[in-house]
Image (spheres, helix red, strand yellow):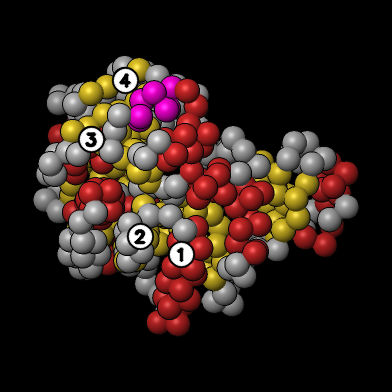
Amino acid sequence: MKVGILGGGQLGRMLLQAGANYPVETYCMESRADCPASSLCQHFVAGDITNADQVFEFGKNLDAVTIEIESVSTEGLRRLEAHGVKVFPSSAALDIIKNKITQKEFYASFSIPTSEFVVTHSLTDVKANGHLFPAVHKAATGGYDGRGVQILNNVSEAEKAFESDAVLERKVNIKKELAVIVAKSQSGDTVLYPPSEMIFDPVLNLLQFQLSPATLPEKVLWKAEAIALAVVKNLNSAGIFAVELFLDQEDGVWVNETAPRVHNSGHHTIEGNYSSQFDMLWRVMLGLPLGNTDKVMDSALVNLIGQSTETIDENSVQLRELSKIGNAFVHLYGKKESRPGRKMGHVTILSNDRSELVHQANRVRNIWENKL
Ligand code: ADP
């Protein structure tokens, strides 16, 4: 079977690593030939994934295509679907998710709990909705990893709001941020991974690490699972989906957003669960039975964020020190350049002892940030 991946970043790379276990011929399209996935796919095509013609040309002779980023041309995917190529997720599901306005309207139309919102096009619209403050203003398109998101604590801060199409939503009083990965097969079967919880630095409000499974009261777990499943069922598409949720101080659960693809919040599944999110997507695409989402062990996931322009090689102190941790699995994405803030890799730590997970996660961060 010939399968194409649109986008060649670390997600494509890890998908290709898992694909090496299956009888597939792999193709990948990305603009830069030195991207993380290019050396792992069998056929690399340099091209623009946002261009409909190039997406169609790339996929027209393949059996299936998938995406690793939402910016892929949905027009190109629609043409591939019409041509008989299987597309994961469907172009229709991607269209809903690509734009934060249609995404929020989708949740509302299926009565899926999400924080109250209005659509805004100008500063005047923002100021006219004082009842939603404190609020979060999100650009309809172009946002990624927190860019395109503004916290507006009161109407006087509205001056800095986006003037373009956006969503203004009530700020949730967050107790925990959760993520649930859901897979849906071509025949409509679904499986869920145990939810993960994000642990933030209370001072800097930066993600420190992620713990899986999240520690949750049973009723909250059920709510989170029911909501994640409702999102995926109503998107009406096979594939793998990461549903990001907020748990509020009153134990209410709200959808923040959904990614219709493999996702950072599922990286721990490579070692932490029987079937990883990447393995699962291959099963979906190949029409195999869905895998086992049970955890093998509890896990912590630490992103290795670029600190400077210095790249890591086998002589780097960081790699040597990380390699000494017996229950840690180090993943470097092979990016040719490092930049502050860029995701350069991740480390998964396995242990059924929570305090050991937290201890090692902090140790990994300190090693990476060179504060040994
Ligand atoms: P992106 O798509 O860029 O990742 P998100 O929509 O996930 O952006 O928002 C980034 C972060 O902003 C979230 O992880 C959360 O901490 C905060 N945030 C977003 N929406 C809300 C909200 N309605 N209430 C409170 N915090 C929010």
Q: Which is the main secondary structure of the residues drawn in magenta?
A: helix
Residue at figure coordinates x 24%, y 54% from the top left: 287
Depth check, front residue: 89 or 352 = 89
N-term-proximal mark, 4 vs 3: 3
N-term-proximal mark, 2 vs 4: 4
What is the x, y in percent for residue 188?
Answer: 36, 64
- Which residue is label 2 attached to? 184
Compared with 228, 96 (above or below) is above
Mark 3 against mark 2, which lies toward the viewer?
3
At label 2, which amino acid type do we have? Lys
Q: Residue 82, located in which quarter of the rendered image? A: top left
Question: What's the CA distance linking mark 1 and mark 3?
Answer: 27 Å
Question: What's the CA distance linking mark 4 and mark 3?
Answer: 14 Å
What is the x, y in percent for residue 97?
Answer: 54, 48
Q: Which residues are magenta?
A: 54-60
- Which residue is label 1 attached to? 233
Depth check, front residue: 368 or 211 = 211
Question: What's the CA distance linking mark 3 and mark 2?
Answer: 20 Å
Q: Tag 2's secondary structure? A: strand
At label 4, which amino acid type do we have? Val
In this orientation, does residue 49 appear?
A: yes
